[in-house]
Amino acid sequence: MTGHVDGNAIAGPLADFFSFDVTMATGRCRACGTVAELARAMVYISGAGTVVRCSTCDHVLAVLVDTGERAWIDFGGVTAIEVRR
Amino acid sequence: MSFITRGFTGRGRERDDRLPPGQTLVGDFPVLSAGPTPDIDTADWEFTIRTESGAQHSWNWDQLMALPIEDVTTDIHCVTHWSKLGTGWRGVALDTLFEGVDTDYAYTMAHSYGGYTTNVPLDDLLDGKAWIAFEFDGEPLDPEHGGPARLLVPHLYFWKSAKWVRGLVMMEDDEPGFWEQNGYHLRGDPWKEERYW
Ligand SMILES: [Zn+2]
């Protein structure tokens, strides 16, 4: 009962997940526990990348780096994101 | 990609050999900020080097100003493809600050007011290669540009020159700082185009 499949199996679910309007999603701040709509977060856009901070405690929720050809996304500052269907 | 043509100077077809690959000259100084600009009074400012023994070497603003101050003219190169040549700074060399510091570790993590971090090998901070800079163009460093003091490591991409620097923590191994965890290169040598992982 320990069988697993490889990462290809999440392609469908993740494509489904990311197709939702992110501004409608809510996230829980890993630092202060506030659950809030991502649209309420504070976004700082610099040349190096985009930093999303919790509007309650200023903690970094997410970092996006996009070079055009390559892009990184770090949601390490949220414990979970909720999207509603 | 238009930067190839923009990399030529107006005077001729020769590319300026002070310009690393993929860089374009700018006249101004773009401001890049990943968070609110910290408001740090020099009366509250402190810079600390912490070593593996737990020893802390700290300087307040007056103590920093009492150290030998150097004028530095240098080119700076941002990972977002702009370079500015011959910029003028004043600051205290890291060599001076490390004079009384006993460490066997070869890496540092620079910490800033506001929470930003960036990793820099110790070798890249010594031998006249890095400063705690507090003046730019003859003026006190603006908060937007990292004032009251920022790290200046001009031979690496400019994200390594941490704004609002407040200290260095010695590290046994090279660990990624804020941007380095999110795609940027661990070292960032512009002549090798070490932009990303
Ligand atoms: Zn928070």
Image (cartoon, coloured by chain):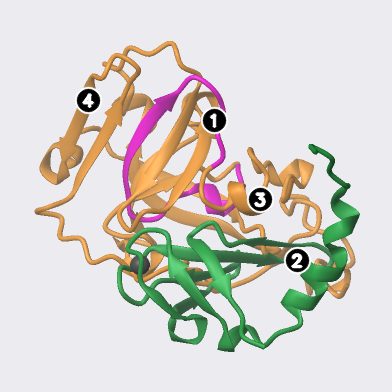
Quadrant position of residue A13:
bottom right
The disc numbered 4 marks a residue on which chain? B
Respond whether the residues carrying marks 3 and 2 are from the same subunit. Answer: no
The disc numbered 1 marks a residue on which chain? B
Query: Callout 3, which amino acid?
Result: Tyr
Answer whether residue A28 is magenta in the image: no
The residue tagged 3 is B184
Query: Callout 1, which amino acid?
Result: Asp
User: Which residue is at the far front?
Assistant: A1
Q: Which of disc 1 and disc 4 is earlier in sequence?
A: 4
Q: Which residues are magenta?
A: B156-176
Q: Which mark lies nearer to you, 4 or 1? A: 4
Q: Residue at x 9, y 54 (%)?
A: B43
Query: Callout 4, which amino acid?
Result: Gln
Label 4: state its secondary structure: strand
Label 2: state its secondary structure: loop
Respond whether the residues carrying marks 1 and 3 are from the same subunit. Answer: yes
Q: Residue at x 26, y 19 (%)?
A: B54
The residue tagged 1 is B124
The residue tagged 4 is B56
The residue tagged 2 is A67
Expressed as whole percent of the image width and height from the top left, the position of residue A48 reads 60, 64
Left or right, B13 with respect to B64, comes to right
- Callout 1: few (<14), some (14-19), or many (20+) C-alpha neighbours within 10 Å? some
Nearer the observer, B55 or A41: A41
Cα distance between the residues tagged 4 and 1: 21 Å
Position of residue B187 relative to residue A81, above or below, is above
Cα distance between the residues tagged 3 and 2: 10 Å
The shade of chain B is orange
